[in-house]
Image: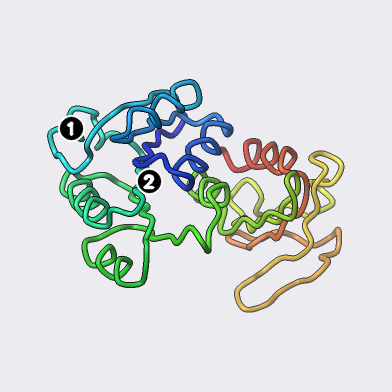
Amino acid sequence: MKKEFAVIGLGRFGGSICRALSEEGMEVMAIDNDEDRVNEFANIASHAVVGDTTDEAVLKSLGIRNFDHVIVAIGENIQASILTTLILKDLGVKNITVKAQNDYHEKVLAKIGADKIVHPERDMGRRIAHNIISNNVLDYLELSDEHSIVEIVANKKLAGNTLINLDIRANYGINIVAIKRNKDIIVSPQAEEAIELNDILIVIGADSDIDRFERKVLDV
């Protein structure tokens, strides 16, 4: 089943996450109190809604607690961001990622139970979207518009296979350049190297090939 996401706040940051999630084929509800912004995302997100998310009744009416992940990307209004996050926690939303404006804002968000706090100046929207789609993806770094390096946790499908058995380069066009195993790092692993459960694979390649690998092997 596709994961369902809600993005609250459709400024530059929230908008980039909304677009990236939609491009990945996810179900996305885009929410903002600005009708013009909502209209802009009407053909991008699965649903686009005008609403004041500091009103608990509004969030309840949207069925917000049924979403797998809610991203609070409210712009300059720190009070609205905090209140929205608090309501989401009270309603029992499973995963909440919140954009912090500054360190003080981050401390408050941590105290009220935000699951993940991000700073837009440090984390790009596409990177965050990629991370929250898959529990197996630890980190995502864009090298260019079309190529990236990704850290992927080896699951049961990968464990026990050698690199030569998987033939990842031939099958997916990507390369495993290193394997992190506990405190050790295996750089340029040999073809006979067997992958162990929870190894961290450092993969490099084209975004489209990495996405194909994730869908096939990680059940994204």
**Disc 2 designates what residue?**
71
Quarter location, residue 110: bottom left
Quadrant (top left/top right/bottom left/bottom right) for the C terminus: top right
What is the secondary structure assignment of the residue under circle 1?
A: helix
State whether residue 153 is above or below residue 211.
below
Residue at point 48% right, 37% down? 18
For mark 2, does the 10 Å Cα neighbourhood hold few (<14), some (14 to 19), or many (20 or more) residues?
many
Residue at point 39% right, 23% down? 47
State whether residue 59 is above or below residue 85.
above
Q: Amino acid at mark 2?
A: Ile
The residue positioned farthest toward the left in the image shown? 57
Q: Which mark is residue 199?
A: none
Quarter location, residue 182: bottom right
**Disc 1 designates what residue?**
58
Residue at point 79% right, 70% down? 187
Horizontal and vertical percent for residue 159?
65, 54
State whether residue 41 is above or below residue 107.
above
Q: Is residue 152 visible?
A: yes
Relative to the observer, which residue lies in front, 164 or 87? 87
Answer with left or right where residue 21 lies relative to residue 49. Answer: right
The residue positioned farthest toward the front in the image shown? 36
What is the secondary structure assignment of the residue under circle 2?
A: strand
For mark 1, does the 10 Å Cα neighbourhood hold few (<14), some (14 to 19), or many (20 or more) residues?
some
Residue at point 57% right, 51% down? 127
